[in-house]
């Protein structure tokens, strides 16, 4: 068996997950080449879930603390190659980050649309906010940042 000790914080779906994949040091002097992926099952003795952490967004996905106190995990729960975690994790990292970037720019562009509509409808000082020069500057800056980010992301996708 493997014997796990330690903790993890900010783990997505940590409260709800039945299986948790842990990056564990399996060769003490191996550095990045001494890490393995180990699957820990719900209910394993010594495996505890901490509190569900408060966060600003993505409320439907819990974020938790996990604690491992002398958790015995069967050798069969090794995921992938022994000491191969770094390669396993890095293999899809670029694609994962690209997916996050696509979602982020889509959200930013949507917020720009909502904000633009809001400043056209909301009035202050007897006229729509969109008529105020400072507000127009801020909207223009937001639009520019979105355009630059979209162009950069498009280039990253092509590359």
Image: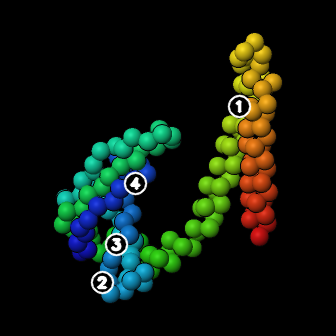
Left or right placement of residue 86 versus residue 101 in this view: left
- Coordinates of residue 80 in the picture (x, y in percent): 44, 75
Left or right placement of residue 10 versus residue 3 in this view: right
Separation of residues labelled 3 and 2 (CA atoms):
10 Å
Which comes sooner in the sequence, label 1 or label 4? 4
Instruction: Name the front one of labels 1 and 4.
Output: 1
The residue beneath circle 1 is 115
The residue beneath circle 2 is 28
Secondary structure of the residue carrying tag 2 is: loop
> Label 2: few (<14), some or many (≥20) within 10 Å?
few
Separation of residues labelled 1 and 4 (CA atoms):
32 Å
The residue beneath circle 4 is 11
Q: Are marks 3 and 2 in contact (CB under 8 Å)?
A: no
- Coordinates of residue 66 in the picture (x, y in percent): 30, 55
Looking at the image, which residue is at 74% across and 23% down? 129
Secondary structure of the residue carrying tag 3 is: strand
Q: Which mark is residue 24?
A: 3
Q: Residue furthest top?
A: 126
Separation of residues labelled 2 and 1 (CA atoms):
52 Å
């Amino acid at each position: 068996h493997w014997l796990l000790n330690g903790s993890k914080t900010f783990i997505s779906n940590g409260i709800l997950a039945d299986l948790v994949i842990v990056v564990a040091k399996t060769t003490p002097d191996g550095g990045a080449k001494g890490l393995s992926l180990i699957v820990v099952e719900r209910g394993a003795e010594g495996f505890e879930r901490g509190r569900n952490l408060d966060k600003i967004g993505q409320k439907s996905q819990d974020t938790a603390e996990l604690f491992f106190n002398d958790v015995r995990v069967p050798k069969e729960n090794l995921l992938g190659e022994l000491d191969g975690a770094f390669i396993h994790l890095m293999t899809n990292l670029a694609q994962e980050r690209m997916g996050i970037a696509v979602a982020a720019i889509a959200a930013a562009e949507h917020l720009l649309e909502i904000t633009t509509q809001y400043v056209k409808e909301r009035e202050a000082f007897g006229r729509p906010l969109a008529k105020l020069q400072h507000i127009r500057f801020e909207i223009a800056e937001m639009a520019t940042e979105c355009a630059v980010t979209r162009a950069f992301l498009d280039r990253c996708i092509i590359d």
